[in-house]
Amino acid sequence: MSFWPMSRCQLVAGSQVLPLPEQAPCHAAYENSNDSWHPEFQGSASPCTKALGVPACGGWGPSSCGFRVKKGVLVLDPQLLQFGGPSSSVPALASSPAVSISDVDTVREGHESELLRNLAEEFPLEQGFTIVFHGRRSNLDLVANSVEEAQIWMQGLQLLVDFVTSMDQQERLDQWLSDWFQHGDKNQDGRMTFGEVQRLLHLMNVEMDQDHAFQLFQRADASQSGTLEGEEFVEFYKSLTQRPEVQELFEKFSSDGQKLTLLEFVDFLQEEQKEGERASDLALELIDCYEPSDSGKLRHVLSMDGFLSYLYSKDGDIFNPTCLPIYQDMTQPLNQYYISSSHNTYLVGDQLCGQSSVEGYIRALKRGCRCVEVDVWDGPSGEPIVYHGHTLTSRIPFKDVVAAIGQYAFQTSDYPVILSLENHCSWEQQEIIARHLTEILGNQLLSTTLDGHLPTQLPSPEELRRKILVKGKKLKTLEEDLEEEEEEPESEPEEAELQLEAQMESEPQELSPRSKDKKKKSKPILCPSLSALVVYLKAVTFYSFTHSREHYRFYETSSFSEAKAKSLIKEAGNEFVLHNTWQLSRVYPSGLRTDSSNYNPQEFWNAGCQMVALNMQTAGLEMDLCDGLFRQNAGSGYVLKPDFLRDAQSSFHPERPISPFKAQTLLIQVISGQQLPKVDKTKEESIVDPLVRVEIFGVRPDTSRQETSYVENNGFNPYWGQTLCFRVLVPELALLRFVVKDYDWKSRNDFIGQYTLPWNCMQQGEPVLPPLARTPALAAFLILSPAPLSRLPPHTLALQGWHQPPSSLHLCAHLHPGRARGG
């Protein structure tokens, strides 16, 4: 794609030129939603709400306060890779006049939007389109003046999104520098005076002595014009971002301090990166990929710029490369895996008045969730609806939910999706549910055993590739279904009620006194056609572990409230572990969590619970842990449990871990950081006081945290040089979370960013993390190494914002084996 040069009003892709009107009128239709940003971000309004102007109330549909339609002008600036409303002409973008293209995930056509479909009488769907953002920011629905104009906008935006996505490290850095130059060049004359540079330094979170800044300015001003132009500004930036720690490491292996020869780079890969025998071949590949100069590539040498590019590349990832693709055995029964699971997936807000939306399913499935929940109730006109029963949450058609699941189920992962069905419908509407599932999902829906025979264990994720399984109530046992040689006529309601008498217990709603009154009414009757769609995941009520062993089968699954599961872990932790070696368990949040908050999932993973369901619309520590665990194995949503949680004879107790598990000691030296983003960008003169906190989550004795002291007024290149030490009894269950905060003596420390990863996915050497775990405007980077502490290699935890290059924390980690003791 050709990108430079281009005017403000056109996009160029190959030979195709797409004109964009400089003032493109459009209607902005935006949904109300209770958007949740990372709760550790503090402020009067969430970045999401401030950026999109999203009201805070709930509701949905044209008869409620669920949306507003405003007229305005939206301008796309392809040169700055941003779009926005000039002079606040688009209310939804009023407080954020420019939105970066890097924050856009994709662009959808109008007919895919719930909101625009509800406005079809006012605007033709062909004139509408939807901008979908990364993370939890609400979608922005727009309507152009014509179908042709809508097509131009959709094509143009998608071309830019694809262009930004395909950028390599150097291109991203170039774009970042270009953005900062535009910010600093206040009068837009293409030059920056020293006064403009001083203002820019504060915007970049840099507090620097004025004399030193002026020396760097003069050194970069090669033309001696008293201003900095493009290349001169690049040199000024390089002088700001010199890395003494990286330079020291580079010179340790470089004989002349200017370059690394092939043999020197091989030495580095073997000694520091622990690459072993493959270091020679790998060195050639890396030089060819990251050395910027053609002459360097020909001579097989790596310059300092190439060395830095390598450190920040995907090849320097903290994750062991073998953990990134599917690396685990996917042929074990389903109950041997942790399964990424969502609670009340349809909700994008709170549990009482929040908005229900198919977008909840789309976002959950795209992030790798493999178990989604659907609460189905009788709806008007004979069509079942999905919502949180007996509350003021909005309603969505069940068939729309099924269509969304069918469309997005396997875009991120090919492994099976479990549809956890909470059925509250009448006989008649249950038949419609069964019909929608069968007709819309087609061959994706698993409606019988894989080979037509009675299995002896649950099938594996590999065997169930691209299949959707229904988890719910069932009239008969699987054995009875398979024993029927002839198709029997449908049972009458009275007969079905007798068959279902002892099987109709469902997951408690725990909503309100009103909902408890409703439960006193007679239960609905289960329709045989819907019952038949439940094959391997029959929902049953849990009474005790003894009762389950004596009366239940491996294909039956129980759900536990968080309080019940906690009690069982405390009272009978080993029995719970053994229960989860042969049967699936699902844990769900308390009904008292009306704000859609979450519990800590780690304590339930410690007991081997497979489906630990979370409110995925709510960011925070709990979802950080979930994202961290399921980042491995290609983000497939399935992670194989440790051996001792899959052994039917296991003696493991999550509350009292003992040998033979091997303890380890982790030493982490936090050395320095660079270009940490400013938390409150509205305060131009403020500079962050950063500190680093390292947290470990695992079994109770292993859960701990430590932090460095804060560095005053320095977010650009803070130095800590502090060592943190952790002893871990059960590393197989441990997750590491690295948090950067802005110290505030008057109030709670402001959250800057975080990164979470499983202990067993850490790679030796000096890897660097790619942009991952997006917080509202941040992506996180991390580097760890078990190299000796005395070597002080440059390990990095980097935080990248809308206009930030890879900023970093230097860490050094050292693992020591140790003897385990009883906890």
Image: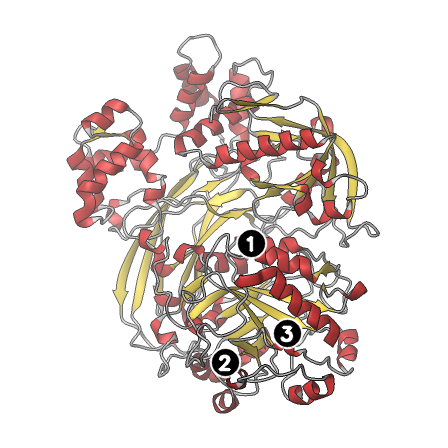
Q: Decide: marks 2, 1 in contact (CB < 8 A)?
A: no
**Residue 487 horizontal side relative to residue 72, left or right:** left
- Horizontal side of residue 507 vs 412, given as left or right: right
Q: Is residue 776 above or below residue 682?
A: below
**Residue at the disc numbered 2:** 570
361 versus 806 height, above or below: below
Residue at point 57%, 76% (across, down): 559
Q: Which mark is residue 257?
A: none
Residue underneath mark 1: 408
Mark 2 or mark 1: whose residue is earlier in sequence = 1
Residue located 55% across and 72% down the image: 587
Residue 157 located left or right of residue 669 = right
Q: Indicate left or right for 700 with 534 as reference.
A: left
x 44%, y 33%: residue:
167
Picture quadrant where residue 293 is located: top left
The numbered mark, 1 or 3, whose residue comes first in the sequence reads 1
As drawn, the residue found furthest toward the right would be 63
